[in-house]
Image (spheres, rainbow, N blue to C red):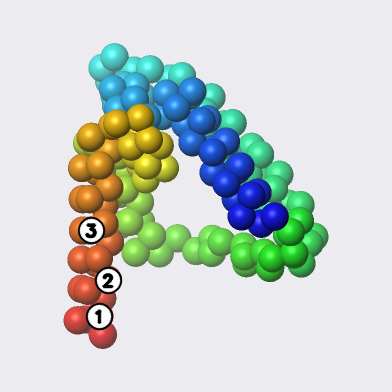
Amino acid sequence: MRNLISLATGALFGIGLVISGMTDTLKVQGFLDLFGAWDPSLMFVMGGAIIPMFIAWRVAEKRSASIVGSPLPSPPNTKLDRPLIIGAILFGMGWALAGFCPGPALASVTFGGTSGIAFIVAMLIGMFGYSAYNKMRA
């Protein structure tokens, strides 16, 4: 049952990304181009994600397990520290340059988006590179 719910929610998320235009790199870059041909339509997409998630966290605070019985993750850390700020800046720069973030990149691959594949490969290289760097530093 848990796998079926995961499949359904993942498919719903992917369909929502495609319908909303989040897999269209030009639309995303248009949203991020505040001083050019700005396209504010993705604010509705973000609001459509932030508002339900805000409600979900409030409901989850009162529960100890999910609907299928799995333990719920602890609330996210709200501390603004240097690694978070640097990571957010790098994420935003990558999003602006590529027009993708991880979810839409994966969704774009399902309909033959080769730019999504390039993004995912670059993202994985960055993730493994950062992990190797952290191990060397420690």
Q: Nearer the viewer, residue 73 or 18?
A: 18
Say if mark 1 contacts mark 3, CB within 8 Å.
Answer: no
Three-letter amino acid code at the position of disc 2:
Ser
In the depicted structure, whether residue 120 falls above or below residue 80: above
SS assignment at label 2: helix
SS assignment at label 1: helix
In the depicted structure, whether residue 67 falls above or below residue 102: below
Say if mark 2 contacts mark 1, CB within 8 Å.
Answer: yes
SS assignment at label 3: helix
Q: Tell me the quarter of the image containing the N terminus.
A: bottom right
Label 1 Cα neighbours within 10 Å, binned few <14 / some 14-19 / many ≥20: few
The image quadrant of residue 54 is: top right
Mark drawn on residue 126: 3
x then y, percent, for residue 118 = 20, 42
Left or right: 56, with 45 as reference point? right
- Residue visible at 65% across and 49% down in the picture: 5
Residue to which mark 1 is pinned: 135
Residue to which mark 2 is pinned: 131
Residue that sits furthest to the right in the current view: 62
Q: Nearer the viewer, residue 50 or 114?
A: 114
Residue 111 visible in image: yes
Q: Tell me the quarter of the image containing the C terminus.
A: bottom left
x then y, percent, for residue 32 = 32, 28
x then y, percent, for residue 120 = 27, 47
- Residue visible at 56% across and 61% down in the picture: 76
Distance in Å between CA atoms under marks 3 and 2: 8 Å
Residue 93 visible in image: no
- Residue visible at 42% across and 23% down in the picture: 21
Distance in Å between CA atoms under marks 2 and 1: 6 Å
